[in-house]
Image: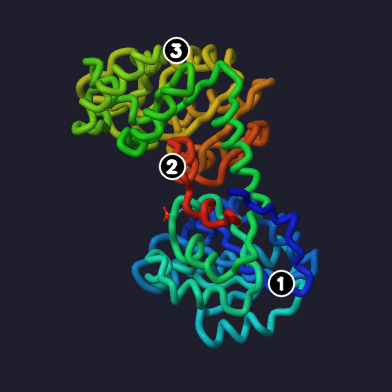
Amino acid sequence: MPIIPISEVSFEGKKALVRCDFNVPLDNRRITDTSRIDASLDTVRHILRQGGAAVLCSHLGRPKERTAELSLKPVAEYLSNALGKKVALAPDCIGEFTGRMVSDLALGEALLLENLRFHHEEEANNRDFSHELARGKQVYINDAFGTAHRAHASTVGVTQFLRERAAGFLMLRELQILQAVTQNPAHPYILILGGAKVSDKIGVIKTMLTRVNLMLIGGAMAYTFMKARGLAVGKSRIEEDKVDLARELFAIAAQRHVPLVLPVDHIVAATPAPEASIQSVTTIPADEMGLDIGPHTITEFIQHLSTARTIVWNGPLGFFEIPVFAQGTLRVGEAVANLSGVTSLIGGGDTSAAFAGQQWANRFTHISTGGGATLDYLEGIELPGVKALAIG
Ligand code: 3PG
């Protein structure tokens, strides 16, 4: 079913409810990575320039109740600076007072509603709450790709009450690249998987084994696969209850002739601490844990990747938050960024955080703002937030 792009909507004289994903990392109410906000600025500016007013809404974190720590206030402040005009924060996302702020909002101006998840009705996709969210607006724009895998009031329910609806520029960009790597990828196609847990990625591994030519596995999840192979893992963080599953995935990969490439060496330490004494080993000693891929693995991964025409990457290859364990992720990242003639898609969350501030990070084809949404899409799961946008 077709999705209308934002460029086809006339905003003149209209108020648009714009669902963004401003679920940004905070340190003591200071935003530590603004990329999700920056990625939606084109959509907001477009609505204002076209003579509309933008009523922005988002969730932040997973609050059980209203709490000052998860107020969108820092986001309103950041938006005011980025757009060069005051973006007021409504004290709530629904209710009489907020309703008055929406009706007083002038065309060409933007308003941010307070955290949607301060109401449990948001995640319950409650009909009355959806109706309230829609009140006073004439158009619905969904630019929250990072939340498109959630069937919530602001991503799904609200579309029953705002029939004129479209995808924002960020949503369109994210879907376009995912479509390209799913429908008609150039081969060789390599998937890089990292991060802590195999359990988060079972579905995507099974689906991608039917699509890719090779999988490179790093991060803590590699140790669960190594254990399944009978290799020494020392004190590494593994999922004991997923070792059989890892064996099963090896068997499926072998049937499909897709090599699952594991690290051949490791950076190990007794604890994951910045001051820990580290060494590079091919066999993990019993009293040490693997915390990054080693230099031979980096070389081997880069060699494989130099042959690829499509690369999808989800999850860091080591404990990148501590600089001594970030080398694998950064060196392989830089090599991928510098490849030419390749489509490279970096899955959101931790992987993009690992590349933040690197001057080569803008050379990937795309760094996604969605982690979970990207994994679901790659697995072949229909995203409810995208489905609800479709007209027909
Ligand atoms: C994310 O950060 O993955 C999205 O904003 C969705 O957040 P959630 O996992 O809390 O629904």
Residue 32 lies, in percent from the top left, at 54, 53
Q: Is mark 1 within 8 Å of ligand 1?
A: no
Instruction: Tell me, yes or no, whether the two marked residues, 3 and 2, touch with CB atoms within 8 Å.
Output: no
Q: Is residue 12 depicted above or below 217 in this figure? A: below
Q: Secondary structure at mark 3?
A: helix
Residue type for callout 1: Ala
- Measure the alpha-carbon separation of dots 2 and 1: 34 Å
Q: Which residue is mark 3?
A: 296
Coloring scheme used? rainbow
Give me the C-alpha separation between circle 3 and circle 1: 55 Å
Q: Give me the residue at 58% from left, 83% from top.
A: 99
**Residue 152 image offset from top left, x and y in percent:** 44, 62
Lower sequence index among marks 3 and 2: 3
SS of the residue under disc 2: loop
> Disc 2 marks which amino acid?
Ile
User: Of the residues shown, which amino acid type is indicated by label 3?
Assistant: His
The answer as to whether callout 2 falls within 8 Å of ligand 1 is no
Neighbor class of circle 3 (other Cα within 10 Å; few <14, some 14-19, many 20+) is: some
Which circle, 3 or 2, is nearer the viewer? 2
Left or right for 275, reference 130 = left
For disc 1, the marked residue is 53
* Within-10-Å neighbours for mark 1: few <14, some 14–19, many 20+: many
Residue 221, by quadrant, is: top left
The residue under label 2 is 381
Using the image as rendered, state which of residue 138 and residue 238 is in the foreground. 138
Residue found 65% across the figure and 44% down from its top: 173
Q: In front: mark 2 or mark 1? A: 2
Residue 6 is situated, as x and y percent measured from the top left of the image, at 70, 56
Mark in the foreground, 3 or 1: 1
